[in-house]
Each structure stands twice: as structure tokens, then as C-alpha cells.
């Protein structure tokens, strides 16, 4: 088939020539990967009215999902999934091949974790594209949701063109989902970034029409620019966090109140008040990986991002900084002491412990001959896979019983609401390190706690 006829065929296949851009058209969409991003994307696109096939090589995970059992914790996901299943708008399969053959549009949401060398591991992407190249039975749109190194979509399009006769578009549509608020982040995004050819972008605009009708800004560009937006955005958010964490270190010695400094900064609309909370350092599956990847590609092109180097160094040293603060609070004596850790997930409202500050903090504690009690509302089982030989306890009071020091590492609401008076009767000694600046300092003082937090914050 000549190239021109192919183009006409693709256009005819993907875009109904008479289609009204304002007219919503339900599409059949396959989503490869059923993790945090794939599942949230699937149930939200189903809520728009599309017909979704969620596919994953993990048959156990697919079996659970078919029984409406979700293997991850994400507020609001269960309800949307139940609605999608009841309206027959979503199905689950471990048959990747047929899921590719049966849809015109394929979203890719497989994992792209960081490997030990700090580079993005593209194994899952490569394996997925191998299967796609063998099962592309007609021209399709492939939409990359996974965060992939800058230039990956362009490279994959070339690879696919060599391996399969059907002309295929590859677009990049980054997710900006925060774990714990992913559903609302998807349904009320600050913007849609669509990277790809004009044809791809027109198709994606039709898919996202319910958002566009709510005046969500759409930025259309090429795939390389869209990939760069994703990395630059996450790296800038990480920059804000490392910046306030460094300001907090200064506040610790000059006597300024870091929370009030952040508040004073955030009132400037040019700065904004988000991502200025000092703490134990950023964790999660994205900031550590994405900032490292952007730094890597900048060095590869001999344009090293000096600011980003400092951001990563600050975050990597933050755990040592807070651990030394804790040692000082404990008069440099952890021998035979019992320490309570409150909060294991990298942030509240998630069971995810990937790159959680709690991992490094507990590893530091284990260098001393001390007993460790650890609590988290929902992340204990995930942390147990990382660290086995500590005492996991499913409630705050028993975690704090007869302890010599309490360390708060995650700002779960029920940790914010701990009963300080009750704890005074339970602990050996009332000593508390609040790395999230969430506990009332006046009350701590009144109850006789020996305490410290991050950046000399006065919390009321
Ligand atoms: C992030 C991005 O926000 C999201 O847009 C992207 O799609 C995925 O990565 P996530 O990692 O889920 O989302 O959580 P986020 O809320 O961004 O927090 C990341 C880390 O920064 C957490 O460890 C959190 O505790 C820390 N953080 C966040 C701070 O230390 N201070 C802050 O003010 C905000």
C-alpha cells in the first residue's frame, strides 16, 4: 500500500472524517500495565464512557482485579472500579496479545523503575514493544503514559516501523498523578500535555473531551518536548523540597521558624505555597528516579544541570541530617534503647514505601544495638518486604509502650492526632522527633517532652 494511501487509511481509521470535535465518541482502549498509573487511568477513562481493556502479565494481579479486588491502596479507586465493572466498561486480561489486537488505541503504563546505576530501567517497555510489534494487525495509536527518558518515543517509533508494516503513531501523554490523590489529579488536572503528531493529538483530544469541556488547558507539542516537560516538572518540584529542606537546616541554627518562612514565601504568587514543607526528604517512585534521569541525560549531552545535582545531593544527605538530629536528641546514646517509628510510607494516604525516608532511617538505627517498633496505618506489609527484623505493630499506643524515643516520619492524620498526654504514661521517657512538623510544640513543652522537629518550627 503506498505511503499516501496509508496516511489516508490511518486518518480514516482513527478519525471519522465527519467527526465533530465537540462530539464525544467512546473508544475501545487497551491499557498495558495495571499499577498506580494504569489502574487509575483505566477507571477514569471508563468513567468518561470509553471501553477499557486493562492488561498485565501478572496473572495473579489480573485474577484479583477480575474479582474487584485492588492490589494497591488509592483512595476512591475501589468505588470507580466497581462502577466501571458494573457498567461493563472495563475488563481485565493477562492475554497481552489479544488485548493489543482488539483495540485501535493502546496506552502504555508499565513500570520504568530506577536501576542501581540511577538509570531508568526500560526492560518492561522493551518487552511490551516486542509484543506490540508482533501483534499490530492494523495501524494504531500508541500512547505512552509511563515516564520514559527523553527521546524514547521517537526511538520506539523508528524501531516499530522497522519491525511492523502497519504505520503506527506513538504519542507521549505524561501523567501528573500524586499517589493518595491520583483519582482527583486525573479528573481535575492542571493541564493535559499531548506530545505527538497532529493526528495523534486530535485522537487524544477526543479521548479527553470530558476534561477539555471543563476547560482543562491542553498543551500540544512533539514527543521530545512533552517528555522534557514531565522530567522538568518533577525535578522542579523536587527542587522546591530540597530548597526548603536546606532553608530548614539554616533555621535550625539561626533560630528562624521554617514553617513561617515557607508561609511568607508561599504568599508570593510567583513562588506558590505548595511543595514548601520541610521534612525528611522526598521519596516515592518518581522524584528520586526522574530527577536522577534528567541529570543523567544532561550529563550525557555535556550540559550538566548543576542546580539539579545540588537538589539530589541535598535530598540524599537529608536522612543523615535528620538521623544526626535524632542522635543528639537521644544524647548520642541508643544502646539498648527502644525506639518507636510512626509512619513508614513515603507520604500519607498510600501504602507505597518506595524510596521512603523511613527505610534509610531504620537502616541507620539498626547500626546501633537498639530495639525498633514500627507503625503505619497501611504500609506495614510493604515495608516488611524491605526490612524484616523489626517489630511491626498495628496500633500507635502499643508501638510507643515503654519506648525511649518516638520518631514521626509520615504525616498520617491519625499520627497528627496522637494523644500526647496518654503517651506520656506509656513511654519510658517522653522524647519525640517530629520530622514532619505536625505536632503542637506548646503542648509538647507543657507535657514535659524533650522534642525537636525540622527547622525550629513552632506548631500550634
Ligand atoms: C509526584 C508528583 O507530584 C506527581 O506529579 C508525579 O506524577 C509523580 O510524582 P508523588 O511522588 O506521588 O507525586 O507524591 P508527592 O505528593 O509529589 O510527594 C513526593 C515526595 O515529596 C513525598 O516523599 C513527600 O513527602 C515529599 N514532599 C512533598 C515534601 O517533603 N514536602 C512537600 O512540601 C511536598
Image (spheres, rainbow, N blue to C red):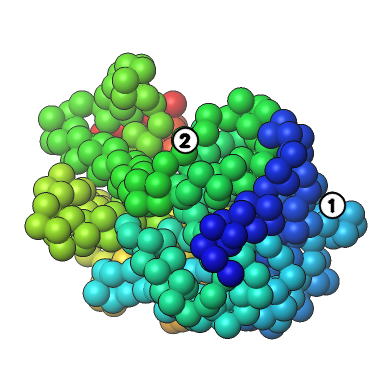
Q: Quadrant of residue 440?
A: top left
- Residue 415 falls left or right of residue 441: right
Query: Alpha-carbon neighbours of circle 1 within 10 Å: few (<14), some, or many (≥20)?
Result: some
Q: Position of residue 249 (x, y in %)?
A: 18, 40
Q: Position of residue 297 (x, y in %)?
A: 22, 60
The residue that disc 2 covers is 219
Q: Which of the two residues, 104 or 43, is positioned nearer the viewer here?
A: 104
Quadrant where the image shows the N terminus: bottom right
Q: Position of residue 285 (x, y in %)?
A: 43, 61
The residue that disc 1 covers is 83
At 26% from the left and 69% from the top, the residue drawn is 118
Q: Residue 247: in sight, yes or no? A: yes
Q: Secondary structure at mark 2?
A: strand
Q: Which of the two residues, 7 or 398, is positioned nearer the viewer here?
A: 7
The circle drawn on residue 441 is: none
At 64% from the left and 58% from the top, the residue drawn is 9
At 83% from the left and 71% from the top, the residue drawn is 67
Q: Position of residue 427 (x, y in %)?
A: 46, 56
At 35% from the left and 52% from the top, the residue drawn is 224
Q: Earlier in the sequence, mark 2 or mark 1?
A: 1
Quadrant where the image shows the C terminus: top left
Q: Which of the two residues, 87 or 328, is positioned nearer the viewer here?
A: 87
Quick check: 400 above or below 67? Answer: above
Amino acid at each position: 500500500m503506498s505511503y499516501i494511501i496509508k496516511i489516508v487509511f490511518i486518518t480514516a481509521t482513527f478519525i471519522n472524517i465527519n467527526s465533530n470535535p465537540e462530539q464525544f465518541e467512546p473508544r475501545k482502549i487497551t491499557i498495558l500495565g495495571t499499577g498506580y498509573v494504569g489502574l487509575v487511568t483505566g477507571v477514569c477513562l471508563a468513567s468518561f464512557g470509553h471501553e477499557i481493556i486493562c492488561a498485565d502479565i501478572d496473572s495473579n494481579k489480573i485474577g484479583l482485579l477480575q474479582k474487584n479486588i485492588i492490589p494497591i491502596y488509592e483512595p476512591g479507586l475501589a468505588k470507580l472500579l466497581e462502577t466501571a465493572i458494573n457498567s461493563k466498561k472495563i475488563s481485565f486480561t493477562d492475554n497481552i496479545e489479544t488485548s493489543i489486537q482488539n483495540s485501535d488505541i493502546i496506552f502504555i503504563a508499565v513500570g520504568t523503575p530506577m536501576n542501581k546505576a540511577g538509570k531508568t530501567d526500560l526492560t518492561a517497555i522493551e518487552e511490551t514493544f516486542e509484543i506490540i510489534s508482533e501483534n499490530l494487525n492494523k495501524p494504531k495509536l500508541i500512547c505512552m503514559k509511563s515516564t520514559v527518558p527523553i527521546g524514547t518515543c521517537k526511538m520506539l517509533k523508528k524501531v516499530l516501523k522497522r519491525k511492523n508494516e502497519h504505520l503506527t503513531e506513538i504519542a507521549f501523554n505524561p501523567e501528573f498523578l500524586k499517589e493518595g490523590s491520583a483519582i482527583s489529579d486525573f479528573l481535575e488536572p492542571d493541564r493535559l500535555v499531548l506530545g505527538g503528531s497532529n493526528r495523534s493529538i486530535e485522537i487524544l483530544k477526543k479521548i479527553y473531551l470530558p476534561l477539555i469541556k471543563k476547560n482543562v488547558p491542553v498543551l500540544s507539542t512533539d514527543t521530545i518536548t512533552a517528555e522534557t516537560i514531565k522530567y522538568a516538572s518533577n525535578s522542579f518540584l523536587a527542587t522546591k523540597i530540597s530548597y526548603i529542606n536546606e532553608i530548614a537546616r539554616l533555621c535550625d541554627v539561626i533560630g528562624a521558624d521554617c514553617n513561617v518562612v515557607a508561609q511568607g514565601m508561599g504568599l508570593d504568587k510567583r513562588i506558590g505555597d505548595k511543595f514548601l514543607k520541610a521534612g525528611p526528604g522526598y521519596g516515592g517512585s518518581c522524584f528520586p528516579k526522574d530527577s536522577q534521569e534528567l541529570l543523567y541525560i544532561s550529563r550525557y549531552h555535556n550540559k550538566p544541570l548543576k542546580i539539579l545535582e545540588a537538589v539530589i545531593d541535598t535530598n540524599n544527605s537529608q536522612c543523615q541530617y535528620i538521623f544526626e538530629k535524632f542522635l543528639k536528641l537521644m544524647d548520642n546514646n541508643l544502646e539498648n534503647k527502644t525506639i518507636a517509628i510512626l509512619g513508614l510510607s513515603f507520604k500519607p494516604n498510600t501504602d507505597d514505601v518506595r524510596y521512603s525516608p523511613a527505610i534509610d532511617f531504620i537502616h541507620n538505627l539498626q547500626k546501633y544495638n537498639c530495639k525498633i517498633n514500627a507503625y503505619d496505618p497501611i504500609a506495614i506489609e510493604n515495608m516488611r518486604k524491605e526490612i524484616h527484623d523489626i517489630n511491626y505493630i498495628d496500633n500507635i499506643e502499643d508501638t510507643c509502650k515503654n519506648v525511649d524515643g518516638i520518631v514521626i516520619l509520615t504525616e498520617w492524620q491519625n499520627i497528627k492526632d496522637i494523644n500526647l498526654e496518654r503517651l506520656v504514661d506509656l513511654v519510658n521517657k517522653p522524647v519525640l522527633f517530629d520530622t514532619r512538623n505536625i505536632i503542637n510544640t506548646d503542648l509538647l513543652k507543657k507535657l514535659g517532652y524533650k522534642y525537636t522537629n525540622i527547622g525550629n518550627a513552632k506548631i500550634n
